[in-house]
Amino acid sequence: AIPLVVAISTALSAQRGLLIRNRTAFEQARKISAMVFDKTGTLTEGEFGVAGLRVLDPALDENTLLATAAALEQQSQHPIAQGIVREARQRKLTLPPVSDFQSLTGKGVQATVNGRQVLIVSPGYLKEHNLPLPPEAAGNQAATVVFMLVDGKVAGFLALADRIRSDAKAAVQRLQQAGIAVFMATGDNQRVADAVAQELGLNGVYAEVLPHQKVAIVQELQQKGHFVAMTGDGVNDAPALAQADVGIAVGSGTDVAAETADIILVNSRPTDITNLVELGRATYRKMM
Ligand code: ADP
Ligand code: MG
């Protein structure tokens, strides 16, 4: 009778937007006591729009800043990059040629444009290199801000905004009602992370973390006795998905995340995880 119940539940799961890659994952789901979500592309849509542009170098203007940024970002797959390129296209800007492109995972991108070294990077990168945060950027509320450096000097910044997925709050609340502590781990800045955490009522938030630090967060929760699930979409989430007791990949995310995960959220809906936990608990309750 047990395999039949499992088979029925697995079929139900498929209808509910879940692809179960590891047969034990369904049974494990009912044991989850802590959930760690990635932010960008997981709790949010991962569709960034440019909300603001600021030029700090008098030799530049807004469109030159945007065209230069887009020229670099054309070569990146990151959701931030796609938002910047989309804005430049909407303004019908001509992009300058770039060479020596390099991706700085979890930090930004770098290339040579017109013989100058240009970087588009996170606030964390500025901190790491002892560059002061421009006061003009400090007032920027809950936006994801990236800075353009030209030959090592801050030349301007772009503020980008993403949307929280429509069912993210319901998912968090139902997980919490099931006794699960819900955390978020993101490479984005503290203010954006705090704004999302507050909106969703999370139990804890980790901001400005690099991929190996996401692994350490999962391990730390495991050492505290938690049975940990991790949900993410990016290349940067894959090591943490592998470390977690249950790894869940968002369907709209990267192949690397999907290949590492036990479960795939086919419709990229966070509430499908909640259904999984509730279904798992109900199924195994019936069997006892
Ligand atoms: P998350 O954990 O939210 O998915 P990532 O680890 O991918 O974030 O990125 C962390 C931060 O690094 C971003 O918020 C951004 O500041 C910076 N970053 C990463 N990739 C890029 C890029 N292509 N262009 C500009 N900034 C980037
Ligand atoms: Mg992500």
Image (cartoon, grey):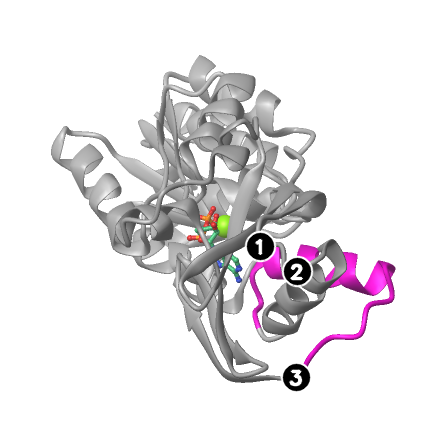
> Mark 1 is on which residue type?
Asp
Q: Is residue 9 left or right of residue 92?
A: left
Q: Residue at x 86, y 59 (%)?
A: 90
Q: In this view, does 218 lie to the left or right of 176?
A: left
Residue 227 at x, y = what percent? 25, 34
Which residue carries the number 1 mark?
57
Q: Is residue 257 above or below residue 200?
A: below
User: Mark 3 or 1 closer to N-term?
Assistant: 1
Pointer 1 with pointer 2, Cβ within 8 A: yes
Q: Position of residue 170 (x, y in %)?
A: 60, 21
Q: State the CA–CA distance, disc 3 to disc 1.
A: 21 Å
Determine whether label 2 and label 3 are within 8 Å by CB.
no
Spatial separation of the CA atoms under disc 1 and disc 2: 6 Å
Local packing at callout 1 (Cα closer than 10 Å; few below 14, some 14-19, many 20+) is some
Residue drawn 69% across the image and 60% down it: 66
Region rendered in magenta: 76-97
Q: Does the magenta stretch include residue 86?
A: yes
